[in-house]
Image (tube, rainbow, N blue to C red):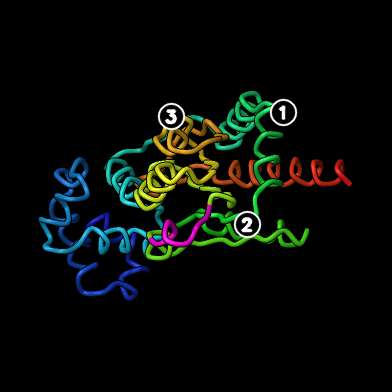
Amino acid sequence: MGKLLETYSNYLPELTHSEKHVLYYIEDNLEQSKTMPLTKMADANNVSTTTIIRLCHKLGLEGYAELKYHLKGIEANNLPNDEEDPIQRYLRDIPETLKKLTPETMVSIAASMQQAERIVILSVGLTKTIGEYLSKRLMQMNQSSTYIYESHMIDLISNWIGRDDLVIFISSSGETETLLKAAEKLSHLNIPSVAVTNNPDSPLPALTNESISAPVKKASYEGYDVSARSTLVMLADLIFEYYLKLILQEK
């Protein structure tokens, strides 16, 4: 068994025949797969792009972009500094994140939430629990909120979302194809939206009205992604606290 299949061996029983076929193809064509676009990967395996995205989600990934990132790290240690201690990395990432945030941005996001008739949170892969976390915190305040993590439901959001609603995208990479497609559709429909990512240079913030990001450097050990998601939880907590303060100030 190759390193790729070893990495995801626990997920194999959950995969369909088509999804396994794609994974075996990537294993056999690793170097080529590292740079192969999603559509070409689908054509090479005679499957739909949806099948590949579904495979990524079953592997615990946000999307195809994150899978390709993992592939690039399979044969190398991609830590920013091979000798850097993980605690030191966190000590750098968290203060750097807080430095880049401004109260004005947080207040603006809170105001958008306060004006929204309904808040919809979209997150997939490893970040879906963060979307659920923020949604439940809002529900504790009796704020109408819902979170969606299934790709086929996210694909349909433009059919029922309204201009009085607010959509919050949560994505570590900011490159998840399912979320990018949804954000692009909502942008054309003038639906208010916010992006929360670990990558300020990713395409997702450019598709939303407002955004906050943690400049977290990607890190992995032999293909195992160890990039922090805790910064996304911190950003979710800040969003909630600024929103709560705004609501209480108006009472």
Marks 3 and 2, the one that precedes in the sequence: 2
The answer to whether 105 is drawn above or below residue 183 in the figure is above
Element carrying mark 3: loop
Q: Earlier in the sequence, mark 3 or mark 1?
A: 1
Residues 189 and 230: in front is 189
At x 62%, y 57%, the residue is: 118
Residue at image location 38% in from the left, 44% down from the top = 184
Q: Residues within 10 Å of mark 3 (few under 14, many from 20)?
A: some
Q: In terms of secondary structure, where does tag 1 sit?
A: helix
Task: Check contact, mark 1 vs mark 2: CB within 8 A.
Answer: no
Q: Does residue 165 sit above or below 106 in this rendering?
A: below
Three-letter amino acid code at disc 2?
Arg
Q: Position of residue 162 (x, y in %)?
A: 52, 54
Q: State the mark number for residue 118.
A: 2
Q: Which residue is mark 1?
A: 103
Q: Which residue is mark 3?
A: 201
CA neighbours of label 1 inside 10 A, class few (<14), some (14 to 19), many (20+): few
Q: Which amino acid does the dot numbered 1 rest on?
A: Pro
Q: Which residues are magenta?
A: 156-162
Left or right, 39 with reference to 7: left
Q: Determine the CA span between mark 3 and mark 1.
A: 21 Å
